[in-house]
Amino acid sequence: MATLTLNEHKEIPMRGSLTPGVWGVVATPFQGSTLDVDLDSLANLVEHYEAIGATGLTVLGVFGEAAALTVEERRQVLETVVDCTGLPLVVGVTALATRPAIEEIRAAQDAAGGRLAAVMVQANSARPEVVIQHLDAIHRATGANVVLQDYPLASGISISTPSLVSVVTASPFVIAVKAEAPPTSVAIAELTSAVDVSVFGGLGGQGLLDELMAGAAGAMTGFSYPEALIACTEAWREEGYAAAQSKLLPYLPLINFEQQAKVALAIRKECLRERGLIKDGGVRPPAAAFPENLRNSMLVHLREGADALVSQAATASAGSF
């Protein structure tokens, strides 16, 4: 494949765009006191996402604790996901520097065997020209499509929305943006009015309704009841705001509960464990462990989620007759 210069990239009139919908951000389950990767639980979780109608999966993201995995563990996780599902995949990149990011992507491409829809790369500077150069070097070296992630809580980088627009405009291999810099609905409205690619919300679905109204293509996030996010986005697409609100409303207390600062990861993994989707809710340091004094609250919210799931399934079944 011939190498394209940045100017040649700019001359390309059309670009792809990541399929709208819900892209589940997959947790990496651990087990036991040594917190070994639990590939069986991972397979179960991935198969659940496919069974409930996820559009695709995001693997080795921040919620997947990729930064806490060895190179070999990342390979095992990705190979397991590839073996368990035919869904399209986005793979997260932990490195902010260009050369390490390229090595991560090459390793992911080797493990995934051509199954990658894109790699998710974080904005690594507040200066758009630096991000453009970073992404261009990545694309030249790997040929990968890119989901540009703006997540200052994880990256430590704050970049303005106009700068993100500049990066996307200059980089036709960027096929989506994941906007996670609050207020997300404001950023998404500005992005969707200026770029021709899918823009996704994240942050556990906390702002999903407002993000959809702002033009979001859906959600790319983790939540212990991803069924709710899927139902909400489908209802929005087919019937509009009122229907989408009714699908998501019963789960909002749980979404809010899961998004608590510092313990969100542990809470969500414990919720997945309680649902039977993974065997153990353990997280690797430096992530904080699940606070046991929140267990009763978690169980209350999970019961509400389970009841809503049963109720919505019954309504759907009755409507099919």
Image (cartoon, helix red, strand yellow):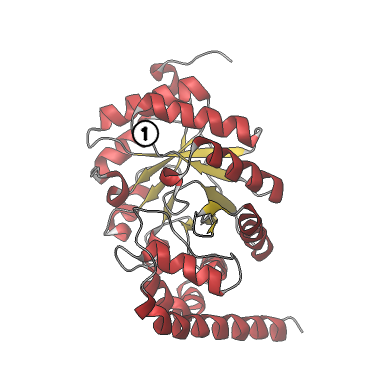
Against 223, is 310 above or below?
below
- Relative side of 99 to 303, left or right: left
Please, what secondary structure does the residue beneath circle 1 have?
helix
- Relative side of 254 to 243, left or right: left
Against 142, is 208 above or below?
below
Residue 213 seen in this snapshot: no
Against 175, is 29 above or below?
below
Q: 285 and 139: which one is in front? A: 285
Q: 242 and 297: which one is in front? A: 297
Q: Position of residue 68 (x, y in %)?
A: 42, 46
Name the residue type under label 1: Thr
Q: Position of residue 318 (x, y in %)?
A: 71, 86
What's the residue at 48%, 52% (across, down)? 64
What's the residue at 49%, 46% (across, down)? 60
Q: 238 and 91: which one is in front? A: 91
What's the residue at 41%, 44% (across, down)? 67
Q: Quadrant of residue 261?
A: bottom left
Q: Position of residue 190 (x, y in %)?
A: 30, 51
Against 274, is 159 above or below?
above
Q: Position of residue 319 (x, y in %)?
A: 69, 83
Residue 126 seen in this snapshot: yes
Which quadrant does the N terminus fall into?
Answer: top right
Residue identifier under label 1: 169
Tag 1: Cα neighbours inside 10 Å, few (<14), some, or many (≥20)? Answer: some
Q: Furthest-right residue in view?
A: 321
- Relative side of 69 to 277, left or right: left
Which quadrant does the C terminus fall into?
Answer: bottom right
Q: Quadrant of residue 206?
A: bottom left
